[in-house]
Image (tube, coloured by chain):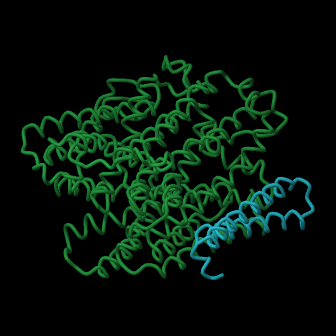
Amino acid sequence: MLKRFNELNFVIGLFFLMVSLVLLGSTFFSKNLSGSINIYTGIAFLVFGLLMILIRQKNSSGQ
Amino acid sequence: MTLTIADYLVILLYFAFVIGVGFIIKKKIKTGNDFLISNRNIPLWITSLAFISANLGAQEVLGMVASGAKYGIQTVHFYWVGAIFAMVFLGVFMMPFYYGSRARSVPEYLALRFDEKTRGLNAISFAVMTVFSSGISLYALAKLLEVILKWDFDVSIWVAAGIVMIYTFLGGLTSAVYNEVLQFFLIVMGLSPLVIVALHDAGGWENIKAQLQPEMTHAWKYMGNADANPMGLHFMSLIFGLGFVMSFGYWCTDFLVVQRAMIAKNMNAAQRTPIIAALPKMLMPLIVVLPGLIAVTLMSPALQSKGYSIPLAEDGGRDFTMTLPSLIAHYYPSGLLGVGITALLASFMSGMAGNVTAFNTVFTYDIYQSYFIKNKSDKHYLYVGKAITVAGILFSIGTAYIAKSFNNINDFLQLVFSFVNGPLFATFLLGMFWKRTTGHGAFWGLLCGTIAAAITHGLTLAEGKGGWIAPMFEIKSGMGQAFIVASVSWTVNFFTTIFVSLLTKPKPDEELKGLVYSLTKKEPLANVKWYLNPVTLGIILLAVTIALNLYFF
């Protein structure tokens, strides 16, 4: 797992994953309806983050 | 604009990740070449995104949104005329010389092709320009944060510069390049929601066209008459000044961007780096020009209810530089606001790190190793590179404070940079494609081109600037003046280089192999798959660029 920190796409994926959690978490705790843009962006960041992480995993297993 | 815990959390996460990347890369740095030129082992997708990100500084992002609001869709000319063609030309025609010559920098290529004095002239002017650019960018960022967030000017400068220093000092060029890719995604993904929401609010592209004057939404239609378009430019001066002289001068010769292609794993990847980078560059107006157009549309009478307006400047006019920050403040709630601010921070940091890493390579190899201490161990140059990184950042901080004290110094330095950059492409064009070009020709051409730029500026007056010799010619816009200055300097350099070259002795052909087009063996590309072939990719990109120009004609 630690070795994966050497892969840039993993680092980028992890970053967006964590930012998405902040966005989704802030909307959940604030209960503010104007934060729907936070939810959509949070989901988009979550998907992008996972994609960046998973694409590489597929490549790694193929090597 | 007030930030909450969620916003600060996003900013802190970003800081932690960019510094973390520095620590990860640090383990791989063993030699001077690892630190300064990444030992030419960076994958293509990373070099391509870093290539585009090094150019995506804070002034680029804020400036293009401001330009979009001020000049409308004609701002896309900086991309579809002033970038793509030059990037394709760099990939197809120039990278084989930069990469194939094994030069570690652009000035080193000049030393191989011409002589030491030409290298010295280019290296010194480039080193000074990068460090001052970095400082001006730092000043702009701190000033912005002071205005919109009420952050302390000194704290912003030292924190932002300190973080760039940590990760560039730890991991050198590789660390800067890796972070540039992270920064690229952050800028694009951090600003995309803004474009989507604001575009929806403005009623879509059709409503923008309906609300704005037609010259704001047509890229070429009103360029036949300089008085009929917001930029005040005729299409011929745009094509020659921006599309040829300035664009090719920047994208094909500026080591800041060319360095990202020079660290690719092999020649093919080096050639494809600027070409692949041209794809996101082509789409960048969606992120940085469209918001400006949306902003002015939102201020039209029909959309007054949206409650948005571009802030006013001290003189009572619109402060277009604040267009993007004001849109972020208007549309982004807590959480996403942090993402937007982090995107601005990222754009600044990618620009500054790009400048610093180009500066330390040129200073170490082209000035220190060439003129001061030769033939030392690799470890010695590694330490020098690290010391220069710290010195470069401290110089940048110093420049930022000078800019704070003397506001006009920004304009002055930008002006000097344009004098130096304007004629440069003529030197490379002749050097790479005419084997008769000599070192003396290149040196005097560069020098005369720069002097011609200064004289042209001194004789022309635009928006109250220039005319310091005698205001003989009045030009409608500052941008038009910049294009004319660049065009004159390029032409003077071109003909001076030819004239002096014909009077002086050229290098023998044997010494020019791999440095000049006619004396370099061409790799056959006929059997290469289309997506690996730089020529095919370049043609596709050019076709799409022409189609975009026609669609938004």
B456 is higher (above) or lower (below) than A49: above
Q: Is residue B171 visible?
A: yes
Q: Tell me what residue is drawn at x 22 percent, y 44 percent.
A: B431
Q: Residue at x 13, y 49 (%)?
A: B509
Q: How many marks?
A: 0
- Name the quadrant containing residue B76: top right
Q: Position of residue B483 (x, y in %)?
A: 39, 33
Determine the residue positioned at 81% across, 32% down. Answer: B303
Q: Where is residue A24 drawn, in percent x and y?
A: 83, 64
Q: Quadrant of the N terminus of chain B?
A: bottom right
Residue B91 position in % (x across, y down):
40, 47
Depth check, front residue: B278 or B385:
B278
Residue B314 seen anywhere in this rendered image of the structure:
no
> Is B305 on the left-hand or right-hand side of B10?
right
The residue at 19%/76% (across/down) is B375
Colour chain A appears in = cyan
Asked whether B23 or B91 is in front, the reply is B91
Q: Quadrant of residue B142?
A: bottom right
> What quarter of the picture does the C terminus of chain B occupy?
top right
Q: Nearer the viewer, residue B113 or B202?
A: B113
For residue B502, above or below residue B91 = above
Q: Would residue B68 appear left or right of B486 to someone viewing this image?
A: right
Q: Position of residue B522 (x, y in %)?
A: 29, 47
Kindly give the residue lying farthest to the front in the view shown. B527
Q: What's the colour of chain B in the image?
A: green
